[in-house]
Amino acid sequence: MKIALIDSGIGLLAAAAAIRRLRPDADLILSSDPDGMPWGPRTAPDLRRRVLTAAQAAAAHRPDALIIACNTATVHALPVVKAALEPMIPIIGTVPAVKTAVATGGPVAIWATPATTGSSYQTGLIHRYAAGVQVTEIACPGLAHAVQHADPSAIRETVAEAARRTPAGVTDVVLGCTHYELVASQIRAALRRPSLITPVLRGSADAVAAQALRRLNGTPAAATTGDGRLTVLLSGRESALPTAALAYTAGRHISIPALA
């Protein structure tokens, strides 16, 4: 089994690590776009072009499925990628876990990039699933960039600022950017407040990994051991895993064995 993941940067690590936990025998292809990141500020046509290019680079390695491990890319480019590659390669997008979070009754906060916060896409998710639930949207400028470059001080500062703007008493926090899942422990610590329950963090990596396996009829029980291979593509160039990726548990989890 071979599964590809695409993102502008290392945000795809969380979903890749989730697949590795469920199917350690699966070969992984990580296709990111360091030459064109971040994708968020780009025009929609340019973003679609870059996402499709990253997907086609991964598709050249003949994966059995491809995950768009980026909320922004899923919003703007999922139909384009599907039109180009399906049905030959099943395509799985990434959707913030708003539906799961609001099922608890809230109140809920959504941490996301400035480009996603207040977007028609995120607003649509809130209207569709969160009727009667208090939802606060928290833009997190600079957090994805800090995570991408594994900058501890910038991560600490941006997480602290977003936590400061998160209302006390929220029961769930949706991580609306895949990069944020890599620093979930720091986010959880920043949201811990005396006499209040620490909110549950709702990421998308586990659900996306499970969905990909369902599409391939590859249940976790099908393989409990194995050394899946890793191929890394940086703007189409075969490379080693970026050094910044190894700063995170998810990156270290998938880094061995690796093919450059």
Image (spheres, rainbow, N blue to C red):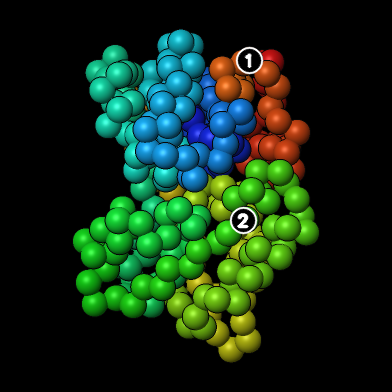
**Observer-nearest residue: 140 or 96?**
140
Please tell me whether mark 1 sits on a helix, a strand or a loop.
strand
Residue drawn at (37%, 38%), measured in percent from left and top?
Answer: 44
Q: Is residue 98 left or right of residue 253?
A: left
Please tell me whether mark 2 sits on a helix, a strand or a loop.
helix
> In the rendered image of this protein, does residue 92 appear above or below residue 170?
above
- Local crowd size for mark 1, using a 10 Å CA cut-off: few (<14), some (14–19), many (≥20): some
Q: Where does the C terminus fall, quadrant-wise? A: top right
Residue 18 seen anywhere in this rendered image of the structure = no
Task: Name the residue carrying label 1.
Answer: 238
Q: Residue 190: x and y, percent?
A: 65, 71
Q: Amino acid at mark 1?
A: Glu
Residue 86 seen anywhere in this rendered image of the structure = yes
Labelled disc at residue 53: none
Between disc 2 and disc 1, whose residue precedes?
A: 2
Q: Is residue 110 left or right of residue 164?
A: left
Q: Residue 6: x and y, percent?
A: 48, 30
Residue drawn at (62%, 56%), measured in percent from left and top?
Answer: 142
**Observer-nearest residue: 149 or 184?**
149
Q: Where does the N terminus fall, quadrant-wise? A: top left
Marks 2, 1: nearer the viewer: 2
Labelled disc at residue 143: 2
Q: Amino acid at mark 2?
A: Leu
Q: Are marks 2 and 1 in contact (CB under 8 Å)?
A: no
**What distance separates the C-alpha of mark 2 from that of mark 1?**
27 Å
Q: Is residue 224 left or right of residue 119?
A: right
**Observer-nearest residue: 198 or 154?**
154
Q: Residue 91: x and y, percent?
A: 33, 28
Residue drawn at (26%, 58%), measured in percent from left and top?
Answer: 124
Residue drawn at (63%, 71%), measured in percent from left and top?
Answer: 161
Q: Residue 243: x and y, percent?
A: 75, 33
